[in-house]
Image: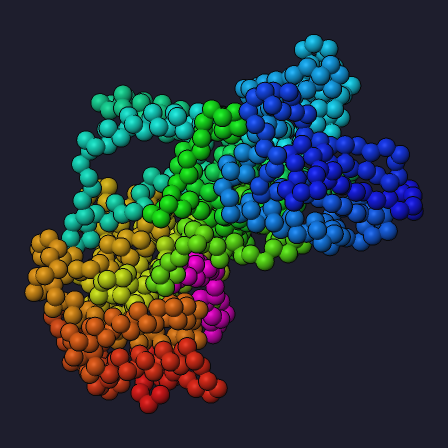
């Protein structure tokens, strides 16, 4: 039972009285319950360091947190040190609320400096801690620690590297504070050795040695990749580039290649493809398989090293929540954050967090589980959590932390045009995307009835662990009280620099697009005789006909993994809504790209995944057709048909068509946005030749498309019926942020085409764009659209969207497509 006597832990700096503490100022940690006090000091300076060699700086700038601490008081009355006792507060809360004001100010000062200075500059003052000369506590002879990494890849000899033995008197010391220890000259106690808990200095040395192993293997990997890239790069130059022909051909060769998505299938990760019998290309197949096997082995080896490094770091990082926390758990060495940043740990974590293949997560489950443990450990400490929530530093070249500390190499930072170091997005940003993918996958799995198999259970378990780790991290952020929002950090903005309003608007638009990009929603409603009906879905008959069919489990998991990827992989301007009951019922919204006749417009598509998907392409229909009157593109018919080789609705070469289990819905959406909604759509029509924006026919074609874009893809979506409907959040976000830019386009188009200011039914009568409307829509559509000033109508609706007033509406439409006046 803990004594009721007050127990105080004090940490006092015993340096000079100057504002900047001496580098050799010892730290005294005393416990009022004991008669003696332990002293944690930097390694004693040798005679060479004091005067015979290079000069030793008397001060350090900026002052680290640990060096400038006056008093830290933690008493039993206020909050016990050990969480195992009955304590009213967590260790982080104790640190946050019980520290003296001087400690808070010092902590904030060091954290501010660590954000402003690159990690190599911060570590300059700590180099002697890792490889500097030491002095034996007994015979006072100089001791030179090893100048090369001696850590084995299994990381079993960490404790051995934390000792320094005098060659003359054989006295064994703690490598951190050089206090004598009772261990043998070759300590084999491992983590049970008392030296590993001696002081904060030896803990950061252990972290340094662990990171040295990661850097060593990462540098080997980069060297191998560069050699391999130089060979394959020469071959790639000899290949003919893929071409994009008019009329829908070539769209399978867009920005996303089919080979990038092999990992959707479990067997693509675990089973190499083999030729059943030799043929004239047998040699090439063997070479390809050899390269794939080598790459797979390389990934496995890297994962093995990363797993061991993550596990070891989780043991040695500060842990204020440990059953028996040490002083260094509460007040860690100030160089830890810079050491972590300078190593290849951020890049290794970022690569794992950016991985969007659920199947690959399972194949590397051990690595991902240890990564989650490490992330939790980093989040438990106020110093190390900044590795997750702060912007990183983009490395152009790095020699590794060992060579840097020894002075054998440098770190070259990637610079922007103004000479500032480019900052990278916080790891927390990638972690949020990983969590979003996990949530999307679990949501899809929850709609599956029946046996999901052992693989499905493992995938759901790992996704649940990822979400739980994210929740733990968020709780730690709340306890620490970090006011900064990692999502609001601008990865490439430099200190003292700025960017134009247009750039800021684009970045904000991208962030909001990412937030709204993907959701599971209810697209159905209860039918009159029971069951669900999809009244507004173009493929409702197919949905009803397949209501009792069962999809192959392998295909079902493929769809869920593909949708999980889309949760974070959609480019700005594409939004997807998936039915929460039927994952094969999908609605898509695509924004017209800038500098095209579709700029500012929103185009809705219905998508259905047949029961044979992914062995067959999805079905796509354009819904934004002006009630069947407007053909917006040679590839987008007024009946809704989408002409695309990937969809099988246009003839093309074999590589341009749908590749079973390789091509994806994401490829289709990106192809529509980037290859159909183009600057000169007139030349998508076969026989119109190569694109020439100055050609008279193309100019006339674009003039009509711009007019219809304003009417049906801009003004139409600002109606109450749509703002209060499925796409309401997207409409508000899109037009709220881009209303001025959209208006400038409408105004420019109006100067070129007076019909924008006097839109009439005859405005759609053009051979290139319009078709005769269906009979059931003709009378109502013509009457509703006579002589409308689209620019004025846009202004009125945007005004009410941005400044809503009580009781005001945008003009409730009595039917789809009705353009109301008198608002």
Residue 136, how many percent across, how many down? 71, 18
Vertical placement of residue 54 versus 789, above or below: above
* Direction from residue 403 to residue 225 in the image, left or right: left
Is residue 377 at least partly visible in the picture? Answer: no
Q: Residue at 52%, 54% (x, y): give it.
A: 486
Stretch of the chain drawn in magenta? 505-531
Quadrant (top left/top right/bottom left/bottom right) for the N terminus: top right
Relative placement, left or right, of 602 versus 651 is right
In percent of width and height, residue 207 lies at 61, 31
Q: Viewer-proximal residue, 253 or 458? A: 253
Residue pushed farthest top? 168
Q: Position of residue 444 (x, y in %)?
A: 50, 53
Residue drawn at x 63%, y 42% is 20
Give the number of marks.
0
Measured along the vertical axis of the image, is residue 735 above or below residue 780? above
**What residue is at 65 percent from the left and 36 percent from the top?**
22
Q: Is residue 522 magenta?
A: yes
Colour scheme in the image?
rainbow
Residue 389 at least partly seen: yes
* Magenta stretch contains residue 311: no
Examine the image and state in which quarter residue 818 appears. bottom left
Tell me the residue at 19%/31% (across/down).
Answer: 238
Residue situated furthest bottom in the rendering: 822
Residue 380 placed where, x, y %?
Answer: 66, 45
Q: Is residue 196 above or below residue 608?
A: above
Quick check: 659 left or right of 690?
right
Q: Is residue 756 left or right of residue 212?
A: left
């Amino acid at each position: 039972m803990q004594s009721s006597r007050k127990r105080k832990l004090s940490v006092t700096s015993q340096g000079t009285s100057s504002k900047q503490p001496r580098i050799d100022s010892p730290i005294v940690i005393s416990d009022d319950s004991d008669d003696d006090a332990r002293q944690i000091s930097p390694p004693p300076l040798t005679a060479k360091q004091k005067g015979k060699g290079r000069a030793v700086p008397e001060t350090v700038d900026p002052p680290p947190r640990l060096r400038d601490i006056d008093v830290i008081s933690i008493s039993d009355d206020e909050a016990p040190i050990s969480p195992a006792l009955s304590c009213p507060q967590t260790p982080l809360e104790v640190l946050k609320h019980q520290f003296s004001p001087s400690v808070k100010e010092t902590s904030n000062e060091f954290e501010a400096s660590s954000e402003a200075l690159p990690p190599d500059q911060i570590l300059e003052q700590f180099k002697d801690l890792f490889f500097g000369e030491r002095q034996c506590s007994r015979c006072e002879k100089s001791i030179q620690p090893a100048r090369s990494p001696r850590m084995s890849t299994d990381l079993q000899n960490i404790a051995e590297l934390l000792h320094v033995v005098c060659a003359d008197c054989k006295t064994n010391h703690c490598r951190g504070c050089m206090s004598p220890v009772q261990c043998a000259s070759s300590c084999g106690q491992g983590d049970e050795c008392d030296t590993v808990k001696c002081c904060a200095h030896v803990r950061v040395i252990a972290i340094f040695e662990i990171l040295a192993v990661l850097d060593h293997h990462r540098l080997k990997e980069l060297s191998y990749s560069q050699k391999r890239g130089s060979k394959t790069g020469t071959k790639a130059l000899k290949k003919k580039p893929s071409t994009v022909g008019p009329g829908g051909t070539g769209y399978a060769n867009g920005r996303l290649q089919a080979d990038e998505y092999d990992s959707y299938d479990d067997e693509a990760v675990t089973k190499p493809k083999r030729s059943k019998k030799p043929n004239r290309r047998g040699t090439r197949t063997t070479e390809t398989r050899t390269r794939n096997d080598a790459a797979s082995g390389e990934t496995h080896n890297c994962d093995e090293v990363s797993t061991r490094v993550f596990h070891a770091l989780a043991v040695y990082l500060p842990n204020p929540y440990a059953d028996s926390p040490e002083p260094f758990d509460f007040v860690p060495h100030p160089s830890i954050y810079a050491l972590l940043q300078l190593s290849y740990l951020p890049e290794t974590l970022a690569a794992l967090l950016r991985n969007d293949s659920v199947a690959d997560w399972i194949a590397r489950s051990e690595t991902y589980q240890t990564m989650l443990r490490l992330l939790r450990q980093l989040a438990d400490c106020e110093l190390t959590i900044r590795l997750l929530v702060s912007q990183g530093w983009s490395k152009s070249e790095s020699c590794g932390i060992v060579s840097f500390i020894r002075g054998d190499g440098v770190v070259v930072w990637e610079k922007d045009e103004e000479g500032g170091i480019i900052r990278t997005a916080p790891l927390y940003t990638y972690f949020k995307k990983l969590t979003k993918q996990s949530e999307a996958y679990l949501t899809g799995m929850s709609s599956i009835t029946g046996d999901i198999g052992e693989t499905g259970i493992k995938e759901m378990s790992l996704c649940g662990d990822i979400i739980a780790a994210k929740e733990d991290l968020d709780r730690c952020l709340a306890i620490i009280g970090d006011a900064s929002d990692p999502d609001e950090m601008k990865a490439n903005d430099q200190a003292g620099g700025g960017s134009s309003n247009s750039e800021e608007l684009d970045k904000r638009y991208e962030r909001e697009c990412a937030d709204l990009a993907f959701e599971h929603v209810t697209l159905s409603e209860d039918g009159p005789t029971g069951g669900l009906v999809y009244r507004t879905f173009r493929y409702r008959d197919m949905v009803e006909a397949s209501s009792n069919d069962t999809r192959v489990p392998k295909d079902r998991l493929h769809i869920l993994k593909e949708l999980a990827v889309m949760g974070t992989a959609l480019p700005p301007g594409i939004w997807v809504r998936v039915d929460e009951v039927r994952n094969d019922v999908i609605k898509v919204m695509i924004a017209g790209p800038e500098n095209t006749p579709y700029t500012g417009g929103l185009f809705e598509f219905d998508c259905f995944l047949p029961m044979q998907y992914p062995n067959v392409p999805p079905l796509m229909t354009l819904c934004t057709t002006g009630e069947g009157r407007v053909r917006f593109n040679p590839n987008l018919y007024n009946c809704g048909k989408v002409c695309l080789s990937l969809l099988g609705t246009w003839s093309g070469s074999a590589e341009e068509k749908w590749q079973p289990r390789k091509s994806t819905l994401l490829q289709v959406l990106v192809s529509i946005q980037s290859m159909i909604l183009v600057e000169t759509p007139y030349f998508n029509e076969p026989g119109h030749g190569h694109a020439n924006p100055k050609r008279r026919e193309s100019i006339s074609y674009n003039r009509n498309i711009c007019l219809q874009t304003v009417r049906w893809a801009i003004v139409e979506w600002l109606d109450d019926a749509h703002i209060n409907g499925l796409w309401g959040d997207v409409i508000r976000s899109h037009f709220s942020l881009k209303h001025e830019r959209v208006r400038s386009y409408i105004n420019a188009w109006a100067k070129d085409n007076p019909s924008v200011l006097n839109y009439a039914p005859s405005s759609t009568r053009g051979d290139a764009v319009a078709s005769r409307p269906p009979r059931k829509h003709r009378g109502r559509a013509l009457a509703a659209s006579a002589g409308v000033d689209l620019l004025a109508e846009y202004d009125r609706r945007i005004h009410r969207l941005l400044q809503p007033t009580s009781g005001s509406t945008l003009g409730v439409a009595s039917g789809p497509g009705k353009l109301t006046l008198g608002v």
